[in-house]
Image (cartoon, rainbow, N blue to C red):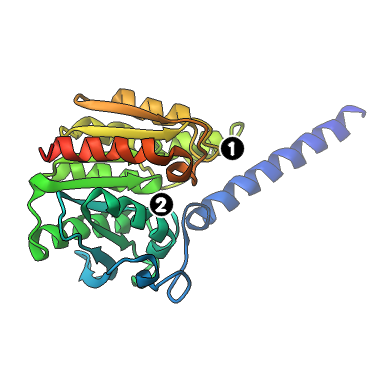
């Protein structure tokens, strides 16, 4: 008789775990994407000394997207920026202003569901958005791919890798990027098989093997969101040429502040080398 209460407790515990796993699977989008729609954000780029041109374009499935084209009158290269999973393009405005001091054009866009872009985020949709951003830069802004550097940060690195694997570019920069959705699920829920239930794959570990352009990986050594070890794992999966830059003591969202001048110098050296502007 004493065993029955224990069995009941175990049964309720297993039921609770099962319900939790089902809830996680049902709420997958809300666990991955944290978009902020216009007018939320800091849309007055001129206050940061930037002259941002609004660019509207469409993904292959017809979803209307928005980005900022920020030219530099002495640009040595163009940076196509794939941002992370939260906020919108305006939340990168301070970082944009500092990066432009490297004498580069910058095109940063919002995925579907973010900022002024229409639609609802999802893995397949963000893939279409990222390819469309590449095409608008090359075809409408007439940017020579030999001077184009793809810059993916965090979740954006997943899609920068996809674009680099399918299109011509001078180089690829990946900052604080992870290996796969399954690996991230294992970090967030170490004792539960969440990775097997979610539909998103984000398999950068496999996709990076198809990228032949020069690659620069950067990662904060104290990253509490995407562990440093995942950044190193992704790096080891990539083919040469490649290099890795430790951002000492940086967490996930403070890389360029903590990294300081040395961080920007590392980016500048890589960009100038791959576009042969040295």
Query: Residue 189 — which label?
Result: 1
Q: Nearer the viewer, residue 274 or 231?
A: 274
Report the residue at 36% width, 29% height from top: 245
The answer to whether residue 110 is above or below residue 100 is below
Question: Where does the image place residue 160, in percent across and percent down from the top left?
Answer: 27, 46
Report the residue at 49% width, 45% height from top: 254
Graded by Cα atoms within 10 Å as few (under 14), some (14 to 19) or many (20 or more), the crowding at tag 2 reads many
Query: Can residue 66 be seen?
Result: yes
Query: Can residue 238 be seen?
Result: no
- Quadrant location of residue 241? top left
- Quadrant location of residue 88? bottom left
Residues at marks 1 and 2, CA–CA distance in whole angstroms? 21 Å
Horizontally, is 183 left or right of 239 in the view?
right
Circle 2 residue:
84
Q: Nearer the viewer, residue 176 or 249?
A: 249
Question: Where does the image place residue 225, in percent across and percent down from the top left?
Answer: 52, 40
- Which tag is nearer the camera, tag 1 or tag 2? 2
Which residue is farthest bottom?
39
Graded by Cα atoms within 10 Å as few (under 14), some (14 to 19) or many (20 or more), the crowding at tag 1 reads few
The answer to whether residue 267 is above or below residue 58 is above
Query: Residue 248 — which label?
Result: none
Element on which disc 1 rests: loop
Horizontally, is 245 left or right of 103 in the view?
right
Pick the quarter of the image with the C terminus: top left
Pointer 1 with pointer 2, Cβ within 8 A: no
Question: Where does the image place residue 67, in percent across and percent down from the top left?
Answer: 28, 66
Element on which disc 2 rests: loop
Pick the quarter of the image with the N terminus: top right
Report the residue at 49% width, 42% height from top: 252
Which residue is farthest right?
1
């Amino acid at each position: 008789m004493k065993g029955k209460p224990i069995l009941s407790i175990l049964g309720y515990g297993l039921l609770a775990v099962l319900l939790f796993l089902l809830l996680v699977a049902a709420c997958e989008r809300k666990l991955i994407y944290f978009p902020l729609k216009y007018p939320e954000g800091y849309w007055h780029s001129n206050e940061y000394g930037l002259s941002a041109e609004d660019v509207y374009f469409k993904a292959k499935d017809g979803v209307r997207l928005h980005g900022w084209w920020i030219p530099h009158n002495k640009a040595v290269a163009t940076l196509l920026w794939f941002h992370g999973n939260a906020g919108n393009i305006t939340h990168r405005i301070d970082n944009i202003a500092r990066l432009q001091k490297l004498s580069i054009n910058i095109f940063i866009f919002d995925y579907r569901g973010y900022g002024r872009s229409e639609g609802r985020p999802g893995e397949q949709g963000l893939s279409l958005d990222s390819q469309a951003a590449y095409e608008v830069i090359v075809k409408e802004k007439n940017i020579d791919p030999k001077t184009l550097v793809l810059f993916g940060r965090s979740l954006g690195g997943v899609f920068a890798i996809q674009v680099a694997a399918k299109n011509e570019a001078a180089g690829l920069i990946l900052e604080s990027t992870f290996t796969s959705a399954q690996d991230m699920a294992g970090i967030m829920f170490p004792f539960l098989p969440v990775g097997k239930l979610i539909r998103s794959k984000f398999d950068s570990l496999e996709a990076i093997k198809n990228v032949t352009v020069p690659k620069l990986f950067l990662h904060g050594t104290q990253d509490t969101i995407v562990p440093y070890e995942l950044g190193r794992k992704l790096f080891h999966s990539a083919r040469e040429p490649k290099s890795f830059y430790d951002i000492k003591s940086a967490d996930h969202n403070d890389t360029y502040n903590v990294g300081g001048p040395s961080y920007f110098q590392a980016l500048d050296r890589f960009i100038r080398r791959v576009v042969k502007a040295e």
